[in-house]
Amino acid sequence: IFDTLSVIIWVPIYAFFIVPIARKFTGNQRGFTQLTRMGIGHVISILAMLCAGFLERTRLNKVKELNIYDSSEYVPISIFWQVPQYFFIGAAEVFTSIGQLEFFYDQAPDTMRSMCSALSLTTMSLGSYLSTLLVTIVTYATTRNGQPGWIPDNLNEGKLHYFFFLLGGLGLISFLLYLKVARWFTYKNADHL
């Protein structure tokens, strides 16, 4: 629910505050170029993973301090401590999704716009499959020799914060590759937009 609420909050913030301010600095009618917008979303998602990792490490420290490793015991940390991560994720989704949809629509040949917009959604589903694969690989790699692994059924015995930090690191590598590829891109002539 926090993710959905965050997106609902971020869309008007983006449209009515961020874009007009960015427009003044960039001179771009949309505030940011599509590639810049996607890049900003990428950076925000990295920050969200780091924030989640630090919160999970804080939660595990509290578990250790109180010696409450049994998964049925209450850890005295409010669920609302997760709101910042979801707020970041919502912002990242708004920046990335809007930028990606506009990019695929505006930069595609006129006869391929619908197909390219569908391709945008396909990349999101591919991301879901890749994240499932990553969880499977991490689980396999970290549960050898009878270890509980990073993502066990009882998270009080795991190292979920390592997984969040791994996601942040992979996001950083992905962002650096994105920057390298984005530099090569030439936008269509503005007359065609």
Image (tube, rainbow, N blue to C red):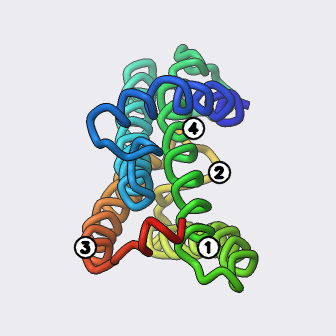
Q: Which residue bears the numbered disc 1? A: 123
Q: Which residue bears the numbered disc 4? A: 90
Q: Are marks 2 and 3 in contact (CB under 8 Å)?
A: no
Q: Amino acid at mark 2?
A: Asp
Upstream in sequence: badge 1 or badge 4: 4
Residue sitting at x 44%, y 75%: 188
Camera-nearest residue between 172 and 10? 10
Q: Nearer the viewer, mark 2 or mark 3?
A: 3
Q: Which residue bears the numbered disc 2? A: 153
Q: Amino acid at mark 4?
A: Gly
Q: Nearer the viewer, mark 4 or mark 2?
A: 4
In this rendering, position of residue 55 left or right of residue 97: left
Upstream in sequence: badge 2 or badge 3: 2
Q: Is residue 76 above or below residue 88?
A: above
Query: Element at badge 4?
Result: helix
Q: Are marks 3 and 1 in contact (CB under 8 Å)?
A: no
Mark 2 closeness class: few <14, some 14–19, many ≥20 residues within 10 Å: few
Upstream in sequence: badge 4 or badge 2: 4
Q: Which residue bears the numbered disc 3? A: 183
Residue sitting at x 44%, y 68%: 142
**Residue 145 visible in the displayed image:** yes
